[in-house]
Amino acid sequence: MKYPIVKLNKKGVKNYLENRLWFSFQEISQFEKIKNQIKPGSIVNILSEDNFFLGCGYFNPKSYYSLKLLTKKNVIIDKNFFLKRFSEALKLRRSIYPHESCFRLIFSEGDFLSGLIIDIYEKIAVVQIHTSGMENLKNFIIDALKNLLNPQAIVLKNDFSKRKEEELELYTEIAYGKTEEVILVEMDEIKFLVPLLKGQKTGFFLDQRENRRFLKNLVKDCIILDGFSYTGAFSFYALKGGAKKAFLVDRSDFALNLAEEIAKINGWKDKIITIQGDVSKILKNPPETDIIILDPPAFIKSSKDIKAGEKKYENLYFSGVKALKRGFYFAFSCSYFLKIEKMKNILKNSLKKLNKEGTIIFNGFQAPDHPVNPFVEETFYLKGLGIYIR
């Protein structure tokens, strides 16, 4: 297919050979000349300065990373392109999770499709599009999903602020089929309500699957404090594992109301206590518990936020260590910019300041249906540490 041409300079070609998928305006030859000639979000052919074909991608001169690579092959980017990619991704998920009905089908650069997230909740597909290039391709994406999965509905959950960086509107819509706003699904023999239209992200956090399973094996006869609980997935895995009671703390009244409904459905109505409020304040005078879980939102969303964000993590993690007299303490971060060694140092210093002893008994990461691309460090984002405090 003859698409507009964007050429990489020597720096860009060097990064291309290192399997990078993103290229800044500084890596594009004659950027100033072409930036007004190619419409933002357009599919382009990528060439070297000596006209060697490198691949196809999409171009947006308004973004710092102006060029995103989709394939190194000379192909048409259409429904069949996505159908092939989605089929490959589905095959991988079926090998990892052969019996799961809820999973992440596409994880952006982890599946070599920059700017695209697709989560599957049984017969519903929820799509998140981050970039103008993918936005322009959404009809192909929808058609490919229909062909591959024959879903009951496809939801476009494009209401997150990151889209503003690409000058995209924020919206949520049911693009195909019909679905309720909140659906009932089952994972690990636990029934969950997933708020597709008004919930965070795609409605549920599938990336914590393996970490919840680990917790489930530790909790018999324990009392749990679930900080930043959202709709209570950690708590419900704990109750499934035999926990006595769970305190769910979150700012969102909407999420906690859903958690109460989930508890009723599973027969745990009397085993949860919901607390709407600031987790940090609750930790100053916490209920007595055996296990504390802190899974906050990303405090560091860009490199300019690192210093301030690390301070927030330090204060939060310290409060968690202080609040737990004895037992298991799980701290998580979904920010790529907080490195695992920094997390360890924060927790070590917290134990030291409080004159407490603790050992790390758990290292947690994102579930394998969120694959890490070793050439795109940002795809490794979810980290967790479990400490046994003596």
Image (cartoon, rainbow, N blue to C red):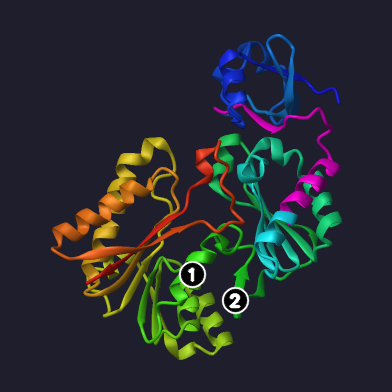
The quadrant where residue 207 appears = bottom right
Disc 2 marks a residue whose amino acid type is Asp
Q: Position of residue 212 (x, y in %)?
A: 49, 69
* Circle 1: element type: helix
Question: Which residue in the structure is indicated by mark 2?
Answer: 188
173 lies above or below 2 = below
- Classify mark 2: residues with Cα within 10 Å, few (<14), some (14-19) or many (20+): few
234 lies above or below 86 = below
* Residue 205 left/right relative to 315: right
* Residue 160 left/right relative to 340: right
Residue occupying image coordinates x 63% and y 10%: 30
* Circle 2: element type: loop
* Residue 102 left/right relative to 214: right
Q: Is the Cβ of the residue at disc 1 closer than 8 Å to that at disc 2? A: yes
Residue 209 in sight in this render: yes
145 lies above or below 259 = above
Q: Earlier in the sequence, mark 1 or mark 2?
A: 2
Q: Between residues 294 and 351, which one lies in front from this camera angle? A: 351
Disc 1 marks a residue whose amino acid type is Arg
Q: Between residues 244 and 272, which one lies in front from this camera angle? A: 244
Instruction: Say which quadrant the C terminus sits in.
Output: bottom left
54 lies above or below 32 = below
Question: Which residue in the structure is indicated by mark 1?
Answer: 212
Instruction: Say which quadrant the N terminus sits in.
Output: top right
Residue 253 in sight in this render: no
Residue occupying image coordinates x 82% and y 50%: 144
Residue 363 on the magenta span: no
The quadrant where residue 351 appears = bottom left
Residue 88 on the magenta span: yes
Q: Which residues are magenta?
A: 64-90
Q: Position of residue 14 (x, y in %)?
A: 58, 20
